[in-house]
Image (cartoon, rainbow, N blue to C red):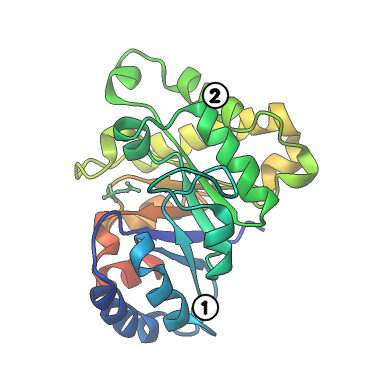
Amino acid sequence: MRKPLIAANWKMYKTPAQAAEYVQTFLPLVAGHNRDEIVLCPSDTSLSTVIPAVAGSNIAVGGQNMHFADEGAYTGETSPVMLKAIGATHVIIGHSERRQYFNETDETVNKKLITALKHTIVPIVCIGEVLAEREAGQTDDVLRRQVSLALAGIKPEEAQPIVIAYEPVWAIGTGKTATPEIAAEAHLTIRSEIARILGREVADGIRILYGGSVKPENASSLLNQPEIDGALVGGASLDPQSFAKIVKY
Ligand code: PGA
C-alpha cells in the first residue's frame, strides 16, 4: 500500500562531473526497478547535472535543504521555486546535521514543510533523538514533539505527500545502526503521533523511512519490517554499486 522510498543523501560530496559519472553507472543498475521509489539528493551545484541525466528514468531528484520563502534577501539560500524550476521533485527538510550545525529548528522545519507542500515538492522531514535523549528514556517524547511541531497547521487533506525519515542521531555516519526492532518501535510511535494529529487514515498512508548507517548488509533486515517504508542513506549511497544493492534489498 505504501510504496517504499529509497533516497540517497550525498551531503557535501561530489562535483558535477563526479555526479554525472555516478548517474551513468547507477542508471543501468536499477533500470526497470519499480518496486521502490528512488530519489537522489545531490548538492545544489549538481542538481542541474543530475536532473537531465535521469530524465525519463525511474529516478527522481531532490534537494538536501531549502529556504521557506519563495524569494528574498537570504544570501546563500535556495528557494522552493528555484528547486521546482529546475525539476527537483523532493527535498530533505530538518536533517540532523542542519539542526546541529545550521540552526535548523522545529519551527523552521514546519515553515519549510508548509512551503514544500504549497509548491508540490515532496518533503522528506527528518526527525530523531540524540544519544543522551535515548539513554534518558526520552525517545518517545522527543519523537512526538518533533512530529507535532513539524506538522503544526497542516491539514489532513494536504498531508499525503509528506515523508518522515526517522534518523536516530547516534546512528548517523557512526556505523551504529538501530536494530530493526528499535527502528520499528520508533516508527510505531511516530505513526501513532501522526494519527493523533491527522487521523488514522492519513497516518496509515504516510511513509516513514529509516536512516542511519544503512548499508547493503543491513538493508533487507531493516526494510523488511512492515513499519519501515524505505531508507534515507548517506555514506553508503555515495557508491553507485552499494546504493543499487540497497535499492534492491
Ligand atoms: P548515514 O547518513 O547513512 O551516513 O548514516 C544518513 C543520513 O544522514 O541521512
The answer to whether 94 is drawn above or below residue 144 in the figure is: below
- Residue pushed farthest right? 157
Q: Which residue sits at x=42%, y=46%?
A: 210
Which image quarter is the N terminus in?
bottom right
Q: Which residue sits at x=41%, y=68%?
A: 47
- Residue pushed farthest front? 73
Residue 169: x percent and y percent? Answer: 32, 34
Q: Secondary structure at mark 1?
A: loop
Disc marking residue 218: none
71 relative position to 186: left or right: right
Q: Mark 2: which amino acid?
A: Arg
The one nearer the camera, 42 or 224, is 42
Asked whether residue 5 appears in the rendered view, the answer is: yes
- Residue pushed farthest top? 136
Q: Are marks 1 and 2 in contact (CB under 8 Å)?
A: no
Disc marking residue 144: 2
Q: Indicate the quadrant where residue 11 lies.
A: bottom left
Of callouts 1 and 2, the N-terminal one: 1
156 relative position to 185: left or right: right
Marker count (numbered)? 2
The answer to whether 231 is drawn above or below residue 143 in the figure is: below
Q: Which residue sits at x=63%, y=56%?
A: 2
Residue 208: x percent and y percent? Answer: 53, 46
Q: Mark 1: which amino acid?
A: Asn
> Which residue is the site of mark 1?
58
* Dot 1 crowding, Cα within 10 Å, few <14, some 14–19, many 20+: some
The one nearer the camera, 226 or 11, is 11
Q: CA distance from mark 1 to mark 2?
A: 34 Å
Which image quarter is the C terminus in?
bottom left
The answer to whether 195 is drawn above or below residue 176 in the figure is: above
Residue 145: x percent and y percent? Answer: 53, 21
Residue 237: x percent and y percent? Answer: 30, 62
